[in-house]
Amino acid sequence: MQVHFGYGNAIIQLPVVTLGIFDGVHLGHRHILGRLVSKAREVGGESVVVTFYPHPRLVLEGSNSFVTLLTTLQEKTELLEKCGIDHLIIVEFTREFSNITACDFISEILVGQLGAKYLIIGYNHQFGRRREGDFDTIVKCAGSLNLDIERVEGLVTDQGTISSSMVREALLEGRVEDAARLLGYYYQVKGTVIEGRKLGRTIGFPTANILPTDNHKLIPLKGVYAVEVYTGGKIYHGMLSIGSNPTVNKDEGFRSIEVHLLDFHGDIYGSEISVTFRKRLRDERRFDSVDGLTAQMELDRQSTLMVFSGK
C-alpha cells in the first residue's frame, strides 16, 4: 500500500475511492473496504482510501474536545494495508479545510486532483462543511462529473449496525470480547513502560506501569484483565489493572495502567510495549489490607492462566 500525505502528487490508475475517518477499521468498515477492493478489480483500477488527520473534532472543538480514538494513525494505516488497499491518502484536517463544501470537495479534489471515476460510500456517510454531503447531495453534485457513485449498506448484527460508537461503548463497559467481535481483532493499547510506586515487587507481583503512546487512545473500563503483552520481540501473558489502586491510594482522580507479566524476569523500564485485551476478569476493588490484595492477585493469576489454557 502506498501512503500519501496530501493528494497533490498521488499518481493513481483509474482511482476507485472511498473516504472517512475509519476509526478502528472494524468489520463494518471492512465491509465497505471489501467492496472498494472488489470494484477496483472489476474496472481494472486501484483502490484508494482518503482519510483525515487530525480527527476533525480535535480541530474544531480544540481543548473542549473529549474525543477518544480506537486507533492511532499508525494503527489505522497498518489495518488498512491488511485490507488490501492500494493507496491511502492522508489529508490534513484544518479549520480552513473544514469550510470546503461537499460539492467542491468532490469536484476539486476527488475528481479534479485525484481523477476519481468511482466513489464508494457507506450507508450513512456524511462529509463536507457542516456534514452537508449526504448520499443525495453527493449524487446531485456528481451528476455532471462522470463520477459513478455506489452506496454500501451497513453490516448488521444482533446489536444493530456495526459502528465505531458501538465498539467504544463495549470497551468503556469493559466488554472487550464483544469489542473484539465487532472489530474482527482484539483491542490493543501501546505505550512506554515508566516507573511507578514499585509496590508490586514487594508483594511478589512486580508490575510495569504503562504510559499510552497517544493520550486520545481509548482506555477500557477500570478493572483487571487477562492480556497478551508484546515487548522485546516476544509475547507474554499477563494480568493488567486499570484504576486508582484504592487499597494503597486515596486519590480517586489518579489512574494507572499496570501489567504483571507471567513467567517474566527482567527490567523493561523505558521499553515500548503493546497490550492486547483478551478478557475482563473483575472490577477494581478496595481491600482491607495489602495481604488481601496479594491473595486476590494470586487468584487473578490463576484466572489468567485459565484464559490462555482455553479452559
Image (cartoon, rainbow, N blue to C red):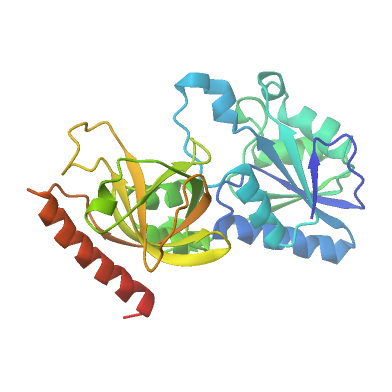
Can the viewer see residue 50?
A: yes
* Camera-nearest residue between 2 and 190: 190
Position of the N terminus, as image quadrant, is bottom right
Image coordinates of residue 299 in percent, x first then y, are 20, 66
* Camera-nearest residue between 132 and 29: 29
Q: Residue at 44% across / 52% down in the picture? A: 167
Residue 113 is drawn in which quadrant?
A: top right
Residue 4 is drawn in which quadrant?
A: top right
Image coordinates of residue 252 in percent, x first then y, are 22, 33
Image coordinates of residue 45 in percent, x first then y, are 88, 58
Position of the C terminus, as image quadrant, is bottom left
Image coordinates of residue 276 in percent, x first then y, are 46, 59
Q: Residue at 33% across / 41% down in the picture? A: 256
Can the viewer see residue 122?
A: no
Left-right relation of 216 to 254? right
Left-right relation of 46 to 62? right
Q: Residue at 15% across / 61% down in the picture? A: 295
* Camera-nearest residue between 212 and 76: 212
Q: Residue at 92% across / 45% down in the picture? A: 11
For the view shown, which residue lies furthest in the left direction?
A: 288
The number of numbered badges drawn on the structure is 0
